[in-house]
Image (cartoon, coloured by chain):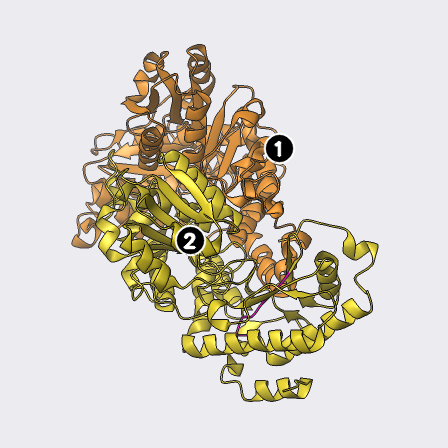
Chain colours: A yellow, B orange
């Protein structure tokens, strides 16, 4: 079939998720396809954070750690995220950054293997922080970091592997692992699995416990819309908790933080994954943001995510053929997260030209244009308008200006 | 001399720092002597954070990492803190929690000693998170953690010590180390020094560079008033930066974070102490809060801090003699930070009774009543009124109720 803008208008009219868009504050005249980098702001966040500042902090002062529920926030927010990722409420905590949480779980997982196995298995092309942290964790636990191509991971899982550390959805290509198959294979050879859910949580239904995942970490500021640099979450399967000894033994991970004992005794529960005092204003913003998921059926959300991605690829075929763009994401939606990436030799300048028209995706070296689809606030016509703008920019060489070609720091 | 409330009123009238109190939003009818646990809210913070949410996040979206200065924030805020602690602007970064930063610098310092020395020297009675983190850092670098009493530290510094890790001002007693003398002694035996400035930064002038300190970490939410769980800061002396290899190798510590290279290459500067993406709303609150120090002469601030503490002790002698209270802080202000602690067998219940009268200090096990003096917003009459209330509560046994004696979690 041939698509038109009218097709997309009709899809929006029939969209069962259309109403959720009103839960967000979005800039007028801007199309935002970068929720995979920084989610848009849920409209309820400012008032909640304002209350936290002017009432809880300014008036309640230190009393608010008890009276305003600050102290239990890492587990309370963790329980809300647990619902979105197929975990139980007492298996998830919110704390620190994804990098820091990854270090905690990798070291803890290596320690559980008691030195029997020499390898942390990772993937080439993973988000760099994952590789850097895995390298440090390997060095500090006397392991070797072995990096293989994503399609070699299953074959590389053997009885030398202590821990395999993967990102569920690749940040560049949107390629998605089969979480169940990889986890099963890892367990079959005696390895533990750590999944980074940075590009998965909030974008699709996840079944950490049905897949028998061991550890996971994830990001608060992408599809969870928690705000810039929002705290991260960490999951530990309940069966592992008694054995988990993570290295960042801050006071909030202690069995009795306010006993102020000299010896560290880890908390029996997921609290043991906490370290220092959490940044409460950022925590509260994330907690408020998660209300955008109230009443959302994650399968319906995934269906729309797939439909948006498929539409983008169909329009790529229909409108951008022969214009120097290549598809860098899987055509098969089952192998894809909630983004579609294109490659183009002038990708950087093209993205700058697109952003100058208030259509926001992002660029990843060397040549990738990334487009993320957040089903809570993205429309089918947004996909149409993005492709139409891309087509015009490439056809007219609107990207070919010194301004758009000048590299600046990008995020 | 005998003090009266009128004496204190006169002291306030003559106080050169009196005007700074208007920079804070303080609850009416409350005396707040717990700024050493959570600083009061600077009045400019809510508007600044609101702007960050409704303009920078909601409207600017991902562009704000560049356009709103989010990306340089860890160093920009670090430079502001550097001025308060006697460091250079390019030696301080803001990131993560104090616990996490302490882990970074302890491991980095141990690595600089190249395994030649077997001991991390710490103090008994330090804030627990410091001890727990030092224990983990020792384990992961093959060191022994040796803990001694504070008055044994100088004697324990010998050529087996790789790193000595101390908190400048003790959280329970307010006892303050001689930073210069300890640092000199440590260097004389070839050890490196890590100072935790949790109870110092923002409360007194500090001279990290004049004392030739190697490493320091500190807290954003106590005397810096950055908000609950505000991000921490980390200092590395410039001369050490090229050798520093901290273990939390997140992407923002990379020489080129957006090159997305597979191998970790630390940034040449203090940026190498960064790990993951910082919680920007909490960062911005801290940055705004630091404006409360604009135009503040840190020596004048210290003079007032000493005067408030001395007044508290004088009034303790004058009003509380024979009531079961003991002084747990040094009488000599040169040995003291910006707090005074009292011991009392019923300290917990007494503090609850005091808080019920809207006079807020805090309690630390087993029997310590802590009173912190933040010169930016505390008045001499507040000290008088606190002592008067303490006297009344103890004399009348107002603390002796089931409500006040029932333990709850405290912070």
Nearer the observer, A68 or A111:
A111
Residue found 68% across the figure and 73% down from its top? A386
Residue labelled with disc 1? B89
Decide: few, some or many residues near mark 1? Use Cα within 10 Å; few <14, some 14-19, many ≥20.
Answer: some
Numbered range of the magenta stretch? A369-377
The residue carrying pointer 2 sits among few (fewer than 14), some (14 to 19) or many (20 or more) residues within 10 Å by Cα, namely: many
Q: Position of residue B307 (x, y in %)?
A: 45, 29
Report the side of A70 relative to B81 (left or right).
left
SS class, disc 1:
helix
Query: Residue B190 location, x and y as percent?
Result: 44, 13
Residue B275 in magenta? no
B10 relative to B359, above or below: above
- Real-space Cα separation, disc 1 to disc 2, in angstroms: 45 Å
- Residue mark closest to the camera, 1 vs 2: 2
Q: Chain of mark 1?
A: B
Say which quadrant the N terminus of chain B sits in.
top left
Where residue A3 is drawn, which disc sits there?
none
Tell me the element at label 2. Answer: helix
- Asked if residue A388 lies left or right of residue B207, the reply is right
**Residue that label 2 marks:** A153
Q: Quadrant of residue B166?
A: top left
Regarding residue B287, the answer to whether it shows in the image is: yes
* Residue A411 picture location, percent across and down: 62, 53
């Amino acid at each position: 079939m041939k698509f038109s803008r009218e097709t997309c208008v009709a899809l929006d009219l029939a969209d069962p998720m259309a109403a959720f868009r009103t839960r967000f504050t979005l800039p007028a005249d801007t199309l935002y396809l970068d929720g995979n980098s920084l989610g848009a702001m849920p409209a309820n966040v400012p008032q909640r954070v304002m209350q936290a500042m002017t009432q809880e902090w300014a008036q309640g002062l230190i009393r608010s750690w008890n009276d305003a529920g600050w102290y239990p926030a890492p587990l309370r927010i963790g329980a809300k995220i647990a619902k979105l990722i197929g975990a139980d409420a007492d298996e998830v905590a919110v704390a620190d950054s994804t990098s820091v949480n990854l270090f905690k779980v990798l070291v803890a997982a290596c320690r559980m293997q008691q030195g029997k196995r020499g390898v942390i298995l990772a993937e080439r092309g993973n988000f760099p922080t994952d590789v850097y942290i895995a390298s440090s964790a390997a060095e500090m636990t006397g392991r070797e970091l072995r990096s293989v191509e994503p399609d070699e991971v299953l074959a590389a899982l053997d009885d030398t592997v202590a821990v395999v550390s993967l990102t569920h959805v690749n940040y560049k290509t949107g390629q998605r692992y089969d979480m169940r198959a990889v986890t099963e294979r890892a367990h079959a050879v005696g390895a533990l699995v750590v999944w980074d859910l940075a590009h998965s949580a909030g974008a699709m239904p996840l079944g950490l416990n049905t897949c028998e995942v061991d550890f996971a970490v994830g990001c608060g500021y992408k599809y969870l819309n928690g705000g810039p640099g929002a705290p991260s979450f960490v999951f530990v399967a309940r069966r592992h908790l008694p054995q988990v000894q993570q290295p960042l033994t801050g006071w909030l991970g202690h069995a009795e933080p306010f006993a102020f004992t000299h010896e560290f005794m880890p908390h029996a529960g997921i609290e043991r994954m906490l370290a220092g005092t959490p940044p409460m204003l950022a925590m509260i913003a994330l907690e408020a943001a998660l209300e955008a998921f109230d009443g959302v059926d994650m399968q319906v959300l995934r269906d729309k995510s797939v439909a948006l991605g498929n539409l983008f690829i169909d329009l790529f075929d229909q409108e951008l053929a022969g214009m120097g763009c290549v598809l860098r994401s899987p055509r098969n939606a089952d192998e894809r997260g909630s983004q579609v990436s294109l490659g183009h030799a002038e990708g950087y300048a093209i993205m700058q030209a697109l952003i100058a028209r208030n259509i926001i995706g992002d660029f990843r070296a060397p040549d990738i244009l990334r487009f993320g689809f957040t089903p809570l606030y993205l429309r089918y016509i947004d996909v149409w308008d993005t492709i139409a703008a891309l087509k015009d920019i490439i056809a007219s060489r609107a990207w070919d200006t010194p301004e758009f070609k000048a590299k600046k720091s990008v995020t």
